[in-house]
Amino acid sequence: MATGTGAPRRAAIYARISRDIEGSGAGVQRQVTDCQKLAESVGWGVADTYVDNDLSAYTGKPRPEYARMLTDLADGVVDAVLCYHMDRLTRRPKELEEFVEAVEAAGVKHVRFVAGDTNIGTGDGLMMARVMGAFASHESVSKSRRMARKWEQDALEGKPRHGSTRPFGYAPDCITVVPEEAAIIRELVNRFLAGESARSLCTWLTDTGVATVAGGNWQTSTLKQILTSGRIAGYREHKGVKVAKAVWEPIITEEQHRQVLAHVEARKRSGRRAPQRYLLSGLLRCGRCGTGLYSSRREDTRRYVCQAGPDHYGCGRLTVVADPVERLIADAVLFRLDSPEMARATSGKSSSDERTAALSESLATDEAQMEELAQAYAARQIRMADWLTAKKPIEERIETTRRNLARMNGHSDLARIAGHGKQLSQQWTSLNLGRQHAIVKAVLDHGVIRPMTPGVRTFDAARVVPVWRV
């Protein structure tokens, strides 16, 4: 397939590089330039260029441009292939055979390489290509093994692993803390622990003009990954497991990190996934039957109603207009934050902090024991049956401690906002719904809506009975 009768007029140039360290695409551009020079020297016309930048040819992951080139070969859009070297085309013997079948099925007679001019159109040339492919595959395996061992060693030494983008909160060296971003992370952690949802926090980041390190908008998955990462607590993780203290400074404390993980687990158990839509969702109960109220819109007025039926089990005999109830509860919550009752309730914060610290220490001990147990099994010091037997009580203790930590978070949440009612009142309209709901929920256990007084047609504040958490 090196040269045939008649020069191709619609050649395809294919270029690929496994890792674009520079991030500029300069490596693949050099390949394209060399292929263009080769095409000019042999008198071939070039129809299209196909570039897979920062993509491995060994892992088997999809290469969009390579797939597009094969499609164009089959459709007759191109009639030849130019590539810098065969290992740029593929590093997998199986894929080489598939490429040979594809060009033969398309009737393509011309395949040229800038380096190593292998003619895969002849038996000897194809055999040489297969040998080269086998060596390339072996080198990829060896390289992967070496890199995996290096990454493991770096992890055990607490060194960072450099990716294509820096982690939020840290400079490109992945070690130096960026003060402005670190302050944002701390606020995110505090608000998340106070009950604000990841969706609400993403909205806040977007509204305040804080972009991701890639310059895009925030997604809940990205935010949760940062909040739960051991990195921001000064841990080096490897394959999802904390393996060492990191060489960089932490942004949050170890205790906060454990509280975040416990909070995430608590949310998973609660099953709540729907975004917050109304201020008092899940916080109001019917004064007749005790069933939770649901928000319902009637024409241009929104109400909280007790719904009857098989899915709700309420009496269906109570309703209240939403807006005045929400304003009344919000004002009461903000007033209570500055009340003597709140000051007395939070006066025991030191004991709460001591309890949280004790739980965090217990959790750390059990997690370390679990890691030791796994290492003992990996080293074949114990049998699998022994490992399974030993890890069960540790897992149960970890689960119990995380539940207790999640409950303790409520005390910490309240301490963060107690005494700030007047300040929050001034900011209230600028806070997003998730933040407002989290503040209300930290103070209010639930509100009871009493039945209407016969003959009263306007809103009656006496119908609303708040039941405070403290």
Image (cartoon, rainbow, N blue to C red):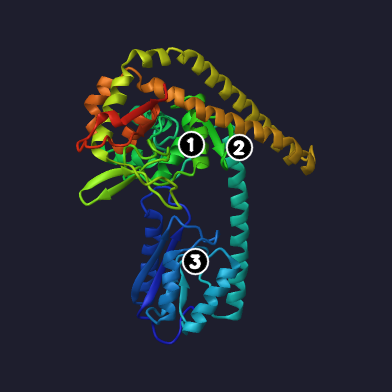
Checking the image for residue 434, the label placed there is none
Locate the C terminus by quadrant: top left
Whether residue 4 is situated above or below residue 357 in the rendered picture: below
Q: Residues within 10 Å of mark 1 (few under 14, many from 20)?
A: some
Q: SS class of the residue under badge 2?
A: helix
What amino acid type should be assigned to the residue bearing mark 3?
A: Leu
Q: Position of residue 91 (x, y in %)?
A: 56, 63
* Above or below 310: residue 276: above
What is the residue that sits farthest to the front in this orientation?
Answer: 454
* Label 3: few (<14), some (14–19) or many (≥20) C-alpha neighbours in 10 Å: many
Q: Position of residue 172 (x, y in %)?
A: 40, 37
Q: Residues within 10 Å of mark 2 (few under 14, many from 20)?
A: few
**Label 1: which residue?**
228
User: Marks 1 and 3: in contact by CB < 8 Å?
Assistant: no
Q: Which of the two residues, 131 or 316, is positioned nearer the viewer here?
A: 316
Pinpoint residue 271: horizontal percent, then vertical percent: 49, 44
Q: Which mark is residue 153?
A: 2
Distance in Å between CA atoms under marks 1 and 2: 23 Å
Disc 1 is placed on an element classified as: helix
The mark nearer the N terminus, 3 or 1, is: 3
In depth, the one of 374 and 162 nearer the eye is 374
